[in-house]
Amino acid sequence: MADNSSSVEIVEGCRLPVLRKNQEHEDEWPLAEILSVKEVSSRKLYYVHYIDFNKRLDEWVTGDRLDMKKLQFPKKEAKTPTKNGLSGSRPSSPEREVRKSLDLNVQPATAPSRGKTLPTPKRKVEAVPLATQVSPATPVPSLPSSAEASQASVFPAVRETNTFKSREDHDQLSSLTTNGTARRLVPSQPGRKRKANCGGAEEMIKVLQYNNPQSASVFLPPPEDSQDSSDGIPTAPRMTGSLVSDRSHDDIVTRMKNIECIELGRHRLKPWYFSPYPQELTTLPILYLCEFCLKYLKSLKCLQRHLTKCNLRHPPGNEIYRKGTISFFEIDGRKNKMYSQNLCLLAKCFLDHKTLYYDTDPFLFYVMTEYDSKGFHIVGYFSKEKESTEDYNVACILTLPPYQRRGYGKLLIEFSYELSKVEGKTGTPEKPLSDLGLLSYRSYWSQTILEILMDLKPDNGERPQITINEISEITSVKKEDVISTLQYLNLINYYKGQYILTLSEDIVDGHERAMQKRHLRIDPKCLHFTPKDWSKRGKW
């Protein structure tokens, strides 16, 4: 195959099968796109992106791993004038053609009239399968879903808007009938807040008698219409927060990893994605970081010299939590700007869906550390806006790769909700979540909500009752996330004019096994945190 690659010139945008090892260390030939070509020691290397695989698997490969027999050359796009008058043509991959056609297909459903405010998209409505005790003849309208925005395409600017298959489906699902009363799904209105109204009669969950010791049914009428878009996909680019909808994924430079390796304390990390470190550092085999101030240096000698002058042995800011060897530090993005920017640069190596912000003033950073005799070593962090109009309690969240799959991700999430409890608010993470972030949040929400439902006890011989708002208030998880989690677990069913939750033995057993493995938990007694009212401060 190497001979074929030398006879045929491979250019950027070409597609062809590329040899790689899968998780079972077996050979496979997935389709890949050539993003860049370079020559090292008279040998050509190709930077490939495996189609339908995460970008963190992108890599440089040699010509002998390319299957030239199935080579697809890129198509040329029509020349289109740009704002500066230059031609906008470039080689186009088949994927870009598909995405362009998708934009054309969905445009009639989303194109707003000029001069008007863009409407917020309606939430998806998903069908929920019936439980075994539900009569087949009973109609099952679905609850409004908090759609998981992180399941969208890798390209943030392409949004799936064709939610309803037909006009009839749209009309049928626009109103839900419960006990003879019609409920209209009102489009969400950003910026408006609704106070928690616990104890609402129509949101009451009734726990039925147990059919067996490990199976329960819970009645759940539909929740109030949300005043906040929960699908996380804004119709216009966001101008606040850590997420900005741009076309950075189309930029060939930012689609490629630019740092080969990072040395952070006793760990060496291989970055997953592009991060805008200075250009002169991207050619180094190893980029050295001080693990306490996160300053980047070009050589081990520079790092050793820096460590003799760096007095930090922990992140700057206030230590607001300590239990055992785990500590959390609160860092103000305005007071500790250099540290915050260095933290963002490091995090961008492992977060693809967030746009790096050099203006860290509007953010607070909560860094989790592990203590030993040498100091407090960074494990992960999350950031949040000082003032969020959309109830976000997390902007970016990351557990560094050496500490992943050890329970630290859930600990970060749990800590973010503990802060929300102290603030007396409900919160939700910024969307879209990464694939790993989505798994962590779904797992945390599931365990937290199931923990409450399974702890419900009968009161004076009567069936215990709880509302959606009460679940939200106890956990500080936003109502939309509570509903989407119940739907994801397939617990919501429609039975005799009411929504019910059915906890099967498999759900209960799985939850108990998961909780036995969850050794790391936040102890609220060890949290020393006083929330600030940032709205009353002139410039944070």
Image (cartoon, helix red, strand yellow):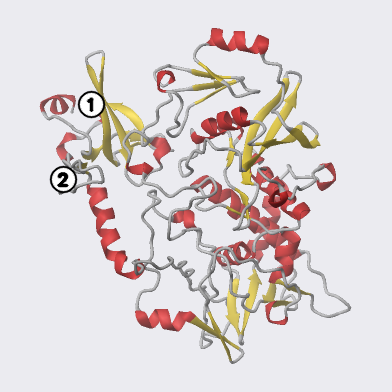
Q: Outermost residue toward the right?
A: 460
Q: Which disc number belongs to residue 75?
A: 2
- Tell me the number on the disc at residue 298: none
The numbered mark, 1 or 2, whose residue comes first in the sequence reads 1
Q: Residues within 10 Å of mark 1 (few under 14, many from 20)?
A: many
Task: Report crowding for label 2: few under 14, some 14 to 19, many 20 or more residues within 10 A (C-alpha).
Answer: some
In the displayed structure, 340 sits above or below 179; it is: above
Residue 238 appears in the figure: yes
Marks 1/2: CA distance? 22 Å
Give the residue pinned by disc 1: 63
Q: Nearer the observer, disc 1 or disc 2?
A: 2
Residue 163, compared with residue 404, is above or below; it is below
In the picture as drawn, the residue positioned furthest to the bottom comes out as: 180
Left or right: where does residue 519 sit relative to residue 359?
right
Amino acid under disc 2: Lys
Question: Going 86% across and 79% down the picture, which residue do you hit?
Answer: 461
Q: Amino acid at mark 1?
A: Gly
In the picture, residue 264 is in which quadrant? top right
**Quarter of the figure with residue 61:** top left
Instruction: Determine whether the residue tagged by mark 1 lies in a helix, strand or loop.
Output: helix
Q: Nearer the viewer, residue 57 or 526?
A: 526
Residue 124: image location, x then y, percent: 47, 69
Look at the image and tell me in which quarter the N terminus lies.
top left
Compared to residue 313, the image places residue 152 above or below, namely below
For the residue labelled by badge 2, is the local secondary structure a helix, a strand or a loop?
strand
Residue 241 percent coordinates (x, y):
55, 48
